[in-house]
Amino acid sequence: SGWQRLQVTDMQRHTARWIYQHDYIGNVCWPGQQNSTAALMKLQCEYNRSSVWQAFEREDDPYSAPAPGSCSAKQATTRGLAYADTLGRLFAQQYVQRTAPRPVTGLAGCPRGSVLLASDSVQKNQRTTQSVYEGLCGRSPDVDEFP
């Protein structure tokens, strides 16, 4: 058709995450919401929270007091990280594999300078960015390339 794709942009905040502290809701869960002390939330929140850029330690969940809970406020869940990885894989399939003259994987599909990453220093956002990149490129981002 004479057209060539030069850029694809994915702009998102984050995927599934644990909730924020909110004074206007009295820092309590809404009706029917799982407290982070629930077994399901332990499965979703018990992982190494750190990204390739920053160490994120576990913080107390304000919604589970007096119990400590398994989630930290503003934390991505494992389900959310899986969604982000899937999105990266879909981008790879749609925009890398489909347009390449031969199959590419890993580093060959994401040569230095071909992908731009940006995130603030919040755990859910950094881990979402990292997971999308891992799905797209088949490896973690390089801190030297993305300081």
Image: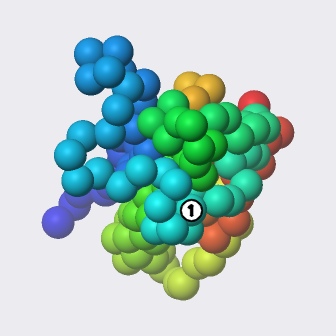
Q: Name the residue: 57% across, 37% down.
A: 66
Q: Position of residue 49 (x, y in %)?
A: 68, 48
Q: Name the residue: 69% across, 65% down.
A: 139
Could one spot residue 43 in this view of the protein? yes
Q: Position of residue 37 (x, y in %)?
A: 52, 54
* Amino acid found under the numbered disc labelled 1: Lys
Residue positioned most to the front: 66
Residue positioned most to the top: 23
Q: Position of residue 92 (x, y in %)?
A: 45, 69
Residue positioned most to the bottom: 103
Quarter of the image that includes the C terminus: top right
Tell me the quarter of the picture where residue 14 sits: top left
Q: Is residue 107 above or below residue 73?
A: below
Residue positioned most to the right: 144
The front one of 97 and 34 is 34
Looking at the rendered structure, the number of numbered marks drawn on it comes to 1
The front one of 66 and 43 is 66
Residue at image mark 1? 42
Q: Name the residue: 57% across, 56% down.
A: 45
Q: Is residue 109 above or below residue 131?
A: below
Q: Is residue 147 above or below residue 143?
A: above
Could one spot residue 112 in this view of the protein? no
Q: Name the residue: 17% across, 66% down.
A: 1
The front one of 45 and 69 is 69
Question: Dot 1, how many residues are within 10 Å of its Cα: few (below 14), some (14-19), or many (20+)?
Answer: some
Q: Is residue 82 left or right of residue 147?
A: left
Q: Is residue 113 above or below residue 80?
A: above
Colouring method of the image: rainbow
Q: Position of residue 47 (x, y in %)?
A: 68, 59
State the SS at label 1.
helix
Q: Is residue 138 left or right of residue 82?
A: right
